[in-house]
Amino acid sequence: AQSVTQLGSHVSVSEGALVLLRCNYSSSVPPYLFWYVQYPNQGLQLLLKYTTGATLVKGINGFEAEFKKSETSFHLTKPSAHMSDAAEYFCAVSEEAGSYQLTFGKGTKLSVIP
Amino acid sequence: DAGVIQSPRHEVTEMGQEVTLRCKPISGHDYLFWYRQTMMRGLELLIYFNNNVPIDDSGMPEDRFSAKMPNASFSTLKIQPSEPRDSAVYFCASSLFGNTIYFGEGSWLTVV
């Protein structure tokens, strides 16, 4: 069975500082990994995904994530936080290419301090 | 292009009443999903359809919950009778096999 653990339900960073949101997964097969963002009162929007190939994945809004098999991790980073990045971020794993069996983490709420 | 469209956006109902949530997936998508989001349990997959056929409903919490997809452009999630613990945000999402899942903006349900 697949599972996702997001460390830290709430992360605060200063504007301009590095954003690091942690995600560890468990999967019995090579996983497909996703980061979604949810702005207040909105649905989830895909930030980036890893399927195969290059382990460093770039997404929208300057975010990127690196798949590290040895660490079973897929941490999300952004070099410089903007106020507009304040949102909740969800890591998800799928064991199918079709990604229709997504298992989500509990989410990490990112606050950006001016 | 229009995204996944859900209605109603907000619903407040009394315990025991029937609740029907509606979803119009993105045109051409062959998968449709219903998720529930709560503070306690996070995001949970309730049920998903492929080509209008329910494939996995193991996430549906109780018999009070039912979902239908009569055609490729419409799905409903029904709760009858509703209970306060059903209060949550219900998301509909759709995808084309092998591609990104797109979420609607959610239906915020409060059962009092």
Image (spheres, coloured by chain):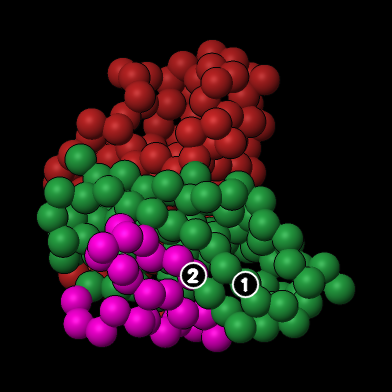
Chain colours: A green, B red
Magenta range is A52-76
- Pinpoint residue A110: horizontal percent, then vertical percent: 67, 61
Find the residue positioned furthest to the front. A70
Under mark 2, the amino acid is: Leu
Cα–Cα span, label 1 and label 2: 8 Å
Residue denoted by label 2: A76
Q: Residues within 10 Å of mark 2 (few under 14, many from 20)?
A: many
- Pinpoint residue B39: horizontal percent, then vertical percent: 58, 36
Q: Residue at x 78, y 72 (%)?
A: A14
Secondary structure under the numbered disc 1 in the rendered image? strand
- Pinpoint residue B93: horizontal percent, then vertical percent: 37, 57
Q: Residue at x 35, y 82 (%)?
A: A56
Give the letter of the chain under mark 2. A
Q: Residue at x 55, y 31 (%)?
A: B40
Q: Quadrant of the C terminus of chain B?
A: top right
Secondary structure under the numbered disc 2 in the rendered image? strand
Q: Are marks 1 and 2 in contact (CB under 8 Å)?
A: yes
Under mark 1, the amino acid is: Val
Q: Residue at x 62, y 24 (%)?
A: B111
| Foreground pick, B78 / A53 | A53
Q: Is residue B17 magenta?
A: no
Above or below — where is A14 with respect to B54? below
Above or below — where is A103 with respect to A71? above
| Foreground pick, A63 / A74 | A74
Residue denoted by label 1: A19
Q: Is residue A65 magenta?
A: yes
